[in-house]
Image (cartoon, grey):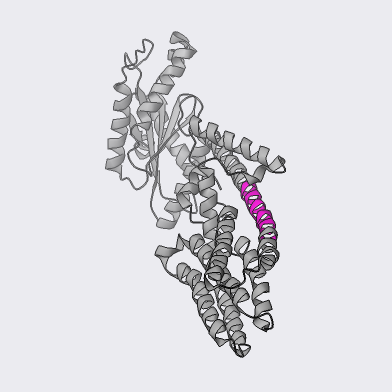
Amino acid sequence: MTLHNNEQQQQKSAAPADSSAPDAPASAAEKAELARLNSLLNERLREPRGMQRAFPEPLERLYRSNHLALTLNQQKTFWPWVVATVGMFCVFGVIMAQNQQGVIYPLNAVISLAVLAPVIAIKVKALSRHVLFINGLAASVTLLAFQIASVVLPDAARQKSVSEYAIIFITIAAFTIARLPLRHAVIWVTLSLLLSRLIALALGVDLELDRLLYFGGGSITFGYLLGFIQYARERTVFAQEYLLEEEKRQLRQLSSELAQLSRSDQLTGLPNRRYFDEMLEMQWQKALREGSDVNLMFMDIDDFKLYNDHYGHQAGDDCLLQVARALGGQVLRSSDFVARYGGEEFVALFHHTNRQGLEKIAQRLIQSVDELALPHEKSRCSDCVTLSIGIASLRPGADNGPQTLIKLADEALYEAKRQGRHRYLFSDTAQAN
C-alpha cells in the first residue's frame, strides 16, 4: 500500500492488491518522507500504546479512507441480516406487547427507521461518504428509543428488561459493529443517555439513576474497552500492511532498477548487447507470425582504434557517448531500437520499414554523426569522426535464424569498410560485389 500510489486509489479496501507493474521512481524528497513514515510506524509498532495516536498526514487520511471503504463493504455484505434480525425483533415485540401497544408500536417504528438509515446510505452514492455519521445517528436514536422504553414501561412488563439488555447490546455495537471512531461513539452514546433523561424529566417519570449507572455507564465502559481493542488492532493491521506493501514496492523498484542496469550500457546509456539479443529474438518471432522481414543495421565508427590511440581513452569515451546520443536521437518510433553492440559498434532494428525507408534512415544516422564534427586527424576517410553501416533484411523461415541476419549485416558493414568507409551498404549489394 504505497503512499504515492494508494493516495490515488483511496476508495480501495484496507487490504490492497499487489501489483506487478513497475513503480515510478521517487524523488529524493519523496524517498526522505517515505523513510520518515516507515521509521515512525516501526517505532509505534514496538510501543505498547503506539497505535492509539493518529498517523501523520497524509497517512492518516489514507487510513480513514480505507476504514470508510471497509465499513461500506461490511455493511453491503451484512445489511440483509441486520434488517432480518430487526424485523424479527419488531414482530416479537408486537406479539409480546400485550397492553403496552402505546409504547411498543412507536418503539418499533423508531427502531425500524433508524436501522434503515444506514441501509439507505450504502445504496445512495451521495450518502455513502457520510455512512459513519449516519451509523452514529442510527445507534443514538435506537438507544434513545430503548432508554425511554426502559423508563416508561412498568417494572412488571417483560419488554422493560428486554429494553434494558438491548441498551447494553446497542451500546457495545456502537463501539464495535458500527465501526465508529471511539470519540464519536462516546459522543453519540452519551448524547442518547442525556436526551433520554431530559425526556424522562419532561414527562415527570422517575429518572432511575441507579439503572442509568448500571445499564448506561456499565455498557459504555465495556463498549469503550472493546472499541479500543478493535481500534488499536485495526490501526496495527493497517500499519503492518502499509509497511509490508512499502517493502514490496521497494523490492519491485530495486528489481526494476537492477533489470534496467543489466540491459543498459554504462557508458552511453543505450541498451546493451543483452537487451539487443532479447529485442532481436522478439522481433524475429513477431515477423515469423506476420510473415514480414526483420531489418538490422550494423554500425561502426570508422578508424576508432586510431582515434583512441591518438586522442586517448577518455576522449574515446567522450566520442562514443556523443555518437550514441546522435544515433539514439534518430529513434522516431516506439518500435525502433538502437543499442551499443560492443566497443565502437552499434546496432539498430527498424520494424515494418521498406528498403527506401531504410536508406533514408541510414542517411540520417550517418548525417547525425557528421554533424557532431568531432575532429579525427587519423581517419582514412575524413577529417572528422564518421560512421559506416551494413544493412540486412531477412524474412524468418525454417532455414535461417537471428544469427543469419547478424552475419549478413556484419558482412555488409565489412564490405562498406572495404569500399572506403563513411557509407552504408545493403547485404544483397555486398554479396553481389
In the image, residue 249 sits, relative to residue 120, either above or below, namely above
Q: How many marks?
A: 0
Residue drawn at the location 60% of the way across and 83% of the way down: 88
Q: Quadrant of the C terminus?
A: top left
Residue 62 appears left or right of 127 = right
Q: Position of residue 247 (x, y in %)?
A: 62, 42
Based on the picture, tell me whether residue 236 belongs to the magenta stretch. yes
Q: Position of residue 377 (x, y in %)?
A: 36, 10
- Judged by its main secondary structure, the magenta piece is helix
In the image, residue 299 sits, relative to residue 309, either above or below, namely below
Q: Position of residue 430 (x, y in %)?
A: 37, 34
Q: Position of residue 228 (x, y in %)?
A: 66, 54
Can residue 75 be seen in the rendering of this structure?
A: no
In the image, residue 186 sits, relative to residue 383, either above or below, namely below
Residue drawn at the location 47% of the way across and 34% of the way down: 271
Residue toward you, 226 or 292:
226
Quarter-of-image position of residue 388: top left
Based on the picture, tell me whether residue 275 belongs to the magenta stretch. no
Residue toward you, 83 or 112:
112
Residue drawn at the location 28% of the way across and 41% of the way down: 357
The magenta stretch is: 222-241
Residue 425 appears left or right of 229 = left
In the image, residue 343 sits, relative to residue 239, either above or below, namely above
Residue toward you, 312 or 379:
312
